[in-house]
Amino acid sequence: MRTELVTTLKRKATKMIAEVREDRSPVLITQRGRPAAYLVDVESYELLQKRLALMEGIARGEQAIEAGRVLTHEKARQRMARWLK
């Protein structure tokens, strides 16, 4: 992953976007020497969002198990059957 100044992004935005889209490698944008943003291609960002949603669902499931909010297999199957109608 490469790092670029925000001023470089301002001057070369079109070129940088094309490179990110082609390489699928994020670019760290810095402002005043500090990380400010990442420039990523759309497909990578959307995949990351899907993965994050999946991980959050898993975490909620683990919390439910710890709290004792569980169902028998039969009850779960009945609920799923209603959703899939």
Image: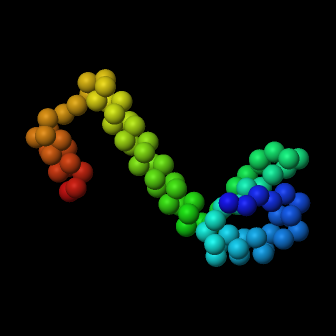
* 52 is higher (above) or lower (below) than 74: below
- Work out which residue is located at the far top of the displayed protein and give it: 67
* 50 is higher (above) or lower (below) than 44: above
* 71 is higher (above) or lower (below) than 25: above
- Location of residue 31 in the rendering, given as x and y in whole percent from the top left corner: 85, 50
Looking at the rendering, which quadrant does residue 25 occupy?
Answer: bottom right
- Location of residue 21 in the rendering, given as x and y in whole percent from the top left corner: 64, 72
Residue drawn 38% across the image and 36% down it = 60
Q: Along the horizontal axis of the image, is 73 left or right of 10?
A: left
Residue drawn 46% across the image and 55% down it = 50
Q: How is the image coloured?
A: rainbow
- Work out which residue is located at the far left of the displayed protein and give it: 74
Looking at the rendering, which quadrant does residue 27 occupy?
Answer: bottom right
Residue drawn 45% across the image and 48% down it = 53
Give the position of the C terminus as an image quadrant. bottom left
* 23 is higher (above) or lower (below) than 27: below
Q: Along the horizontal axis of the image, is 16 left or right of 32?
A: left
Disc tally is 0
Residue drawn 36% across the image and 30% down it = 63
Looking at the rendering, which quadrant does residue 74 occupy?
Answer: top left
- Location of residue 56 in the rendering, given as x and y in whole percent from the top left corner: 44, 42
Give the position of the N terminus as an image quadrant. bottom right
- Depth check: 74 or 43 in front? 43
